[in-house]
Each structure stands twice: as structure tokens, then as C-alpha cells.
Image (cartoon, rainbow, N blue to C red):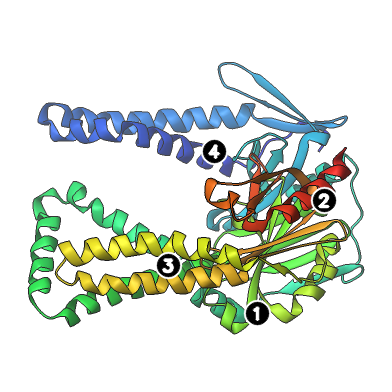
Amino acid sequence: MYKPQRIHPLGILSFTVRTLYSMGQALLPLLIIAIAQPTFRKWIFVAIPLLLAFFIAYGILYWLRYVFYISGQELRVEYGVMVKKKRYIPFERIQSVQITAGILQRLFGLVKVEVETAGGGKEAEFVLAALPRKTALELQKILQAGGKLLEEAPDGKDSIEYKLSIRSLLLLASTSNGIGVAISAILVVLSQLDDFLPQMNVWVKIGSYAEHLAAARVSLIILAVFLLILLAWLLSLFGTIIRFSGFHLRREGDSIKINRGLFEKQQLNIPLKRIQAVKVVEGLLRQPLGVVSVQVVSISNIGAKGEGKVLFPLLPKAELPEFLEKVAPEFSVPLEFQSLPLRAKRRYLLIIIIPALIIAILGSVFLPWGYVAFILPLLGAWLGNKQYHDAGYQLQDNILLLRSRKLGKETIIIPRRRIQSLHVSQNPFQLHSNLSNLKVAIASSNVAVTAQLKGMEKEISDCIMNGLMSGHE
């Protein structure tokens, strides 16, 4: 680690593919136009192999010049083909070191190392695309220990482990809220069909078929919607299984290590001191089953696309106090809440019922079966009532608890020393009712994460703000 060394030669392939992908995205429109012109078509088939050979050669040179090593209290990187560049990353700026292994990397016994720093934005500041696992683990320990190589703790000693069982994984996948994302993805793919298959007039055929369905029985329309939802649910099911298969949490000392993933194995490390808040999420489908998902708000960019924010994906609610006590004791408090005043209920109802009623009226006027939309105000009234009854707050042992609901119920646990700022506001409709909104900002990886509770007594929200912020003075 203290002498300059290169990554594995497989990194050449990673660099070449990444460069070609970036260029392909930028040049794809020009490439399509050129292929459509017979005069340019033959030159393209000559240019593509030449460009490919150039990027492979450039990738080899880049790999030869790319070295990393540790010097003093810094991680140093030297790279560049035409111009040699140097980057020095002090240990105190390093927030986390994450290890992942894709399918290709696993075939060669390699992993990818991502080093995240304070103020590094959404992407990792430093990435080693291909390292032997042993080297990666050694580098991770040195960086997270501030330059000192830690001794391995004996297996099972002073450690706490939680594993996601196959039964829990299937329950997690079948109740995932990713169905909305899957439906959006299906619609995006369908919207691009005419661009990729212009000769087939896909949308013209879909439109004529939809008119035929509308003229036919309502049952056919219901069947089509059901099949779309079923397809989206299956995509969400398999996506969740791929992401969370083999989920294993292990707390060792002052850090939490998480391993997960079916095809791409990810090893995430969450230092306890970086956790700013804990969220307990009860999905609409999971709440009747008595299970919750535990998430964290952390300073580091844990994992990709926010997936690493999941501390444990599915846990019986009855086991939550014990889980927090063992894994994150700073956030272990009784989840008891004060309810909102009754006069706040009207806001929770009207803010959903009024838009739903407008949509229902417009639907009944302009759509053949639009009167069915009048079920929306009823669903809105039910949801607004649930949001009001589930909303709550509590301040105990210098820890603020806020509970709210959109579709699922969410509880956030915030120690006072993790709070960045608090803000109490009133809109014109709340002034005469003496109600207010409490907004809390918490530090995260690149922007502040906020938690908000609407409809609190003005005196209580002021009291909470004064009590919490007095500790920061």
C-alpha cells in the first residue's frame, strides 16, 4: 500500500467500455444520421474499428500511468496519458470506503473500491475499478482506521449480526413499492417504440386497438390494466430480489458492515458517527403484516442510487426496539407520540379531497367511463384521515421523533446534536387556528435532508424549536 501500484489489467476493459459508452451517448444521433446516408455508410464501418483500436491503446497507456499509494496521512493517485496529474486525499476527508463486485469482476476474483469524501457530491471522488479482494480489504481498513492497519477481530466476538431470510426476502419483494417505478419504465420503453421501429407504426396500432377495446366490453380494458400492473409487479419483484439477496448486516465496534446483492455483490461500510438520523418506514402493504424497513440518513453517499440508505430492509416491528438498541443505540428510544390537535384534521382532508374531486368532475365530463373517477374523493378522504391520525411528534432524552404519512407511514428519529436547523412556519389558513408547521434540516451526503410535520400547535412547535436550538448555542 505504501509503494506505487497499479490496478488489475481488467481495469483496461473497464476504462475502455466506460469511454466508449460516454462517446456513444454523445455521438449516437450523428451515427444514426450517417448510417442513413449511403455516401457516409461505408466510412462508418472503417472508422468504428479504428476508433475501437485507438481507445484500447489509450486504455492500456492510461492503465500504465495510473498508480495509487499511501504516503503519510494521504491517499495519493497519479494518472494521465498526455499530462500527468496528481491527487492527494487526506484521510480526514474520507467519509467511507465501499467495495462492490460485478459479475465480470467476480469471475477474476476482483472488486471495485469507491472512496467517498466530504463534499464529494453524488459520485465517489475516487474509484479503483479492479483490485484483488485481499488488497481492497487491506486498503479499506487502512483508510478507515486513519492510516493504521487494524487487527481482525475474532469471529463472533463483540459483533452483532442480522441476516435477511429467504422468507423475508420474498415478502420484501412481493410488497415492494417499486411497482410505480416499473410502470414508469414500461411506459418510457413504449414511448420510444416509434423511434426504434418507425416502419411498424406501433402507436398507430396501439391507438386503433385501444379504440376497439373502448368500443368493446369494459372487462377487456380492466384485463389490459391488470396485465400491465402484473408485469410491473413481476419486474419490481425480481429487481428487489436481485438487489437485496444475501443481505447480511454485521456491527463491529463503531461501524456497520452490510453485504448484499445477487449478481453484483456489494460490501457497504457505515460508520456509526456518520449516521445523522434513522427512518422507520411502514409501507401500505407491509403495515398490516407488522413489518418495517429501517433506513439511515448518513453523511456519506452509501451505495448507488440511495440503495445503501437501507439499514435493514424488512424487520418485524416488535423486534425494532431490540434492533436499534444493538445496532444503533444512539437512536434507541420508545416510539411514543403526541397526536395533532383535532382542528388540524380539516387540512389533511381538504388538501387531498379537493384535487381528487376536480379530477373526478373533469373525468365524468370528458371520458366515457369518467364517473368511475368519483371513487377518488372517497379514497382521498380515507387517506387524509389516515395521514391525520398517524401524524405525531415527541421530544425525549434530547431526541426528536416525527411521524407522518404520504402513502406509507414514516417515523424519523433525530438526536439534537444531529440537527442542522429548525424552522416554524404558518400559512394564512393556519393563523386563525393557531397551527404551524415544523421543518427540521439534517446533514446528508451533498444536500440537507428535511423532515416536516404540519398542523402542530404553535406553542408546542415554538417550544420544541427553542428547546432543541438552545443546545446549539
Answer with mark 3 or mark 2, whichever residue precedes in sequence.
3
Q: How far, Cα to Cα, is label 1 from label 2? A: 35 Å
Note whether 181 is above or below 420 in the view shown. below
Residue 165: which numbered mark, if any?
Answer: 1
- Residue 300 % position (x, y): 70, 45
Q: Earlier in the sequence, mark 1 or mark 2?
A: 1
| Label 2 residue SS | helix
Q: Nearer the viewer, residue 202 or 417?
A: 417
Q: Nearer the viewer, mark 1 or mark 2?
A: 2
Mark 2, other Cα within 10 Å: few <14 / some 14–19 / many ≥20: some
Picture mark count: 4
Measure the C-alpha gap from mark 3 to mark 2: 36 Å
Residue 17 position within the rendered picture, expressed as x and y whole percent measured from the top left: 46, 40
> Mark 3 or mark 1, which has the lower sequence index?
1
Residue 436's x, y, as percent? 64, 52
What numbered label is drawn on residue 12? 4
Question: What residue sits right under mark 2 in the picture?
Answer: 416
Camera-side mark, 3 or 4? 3
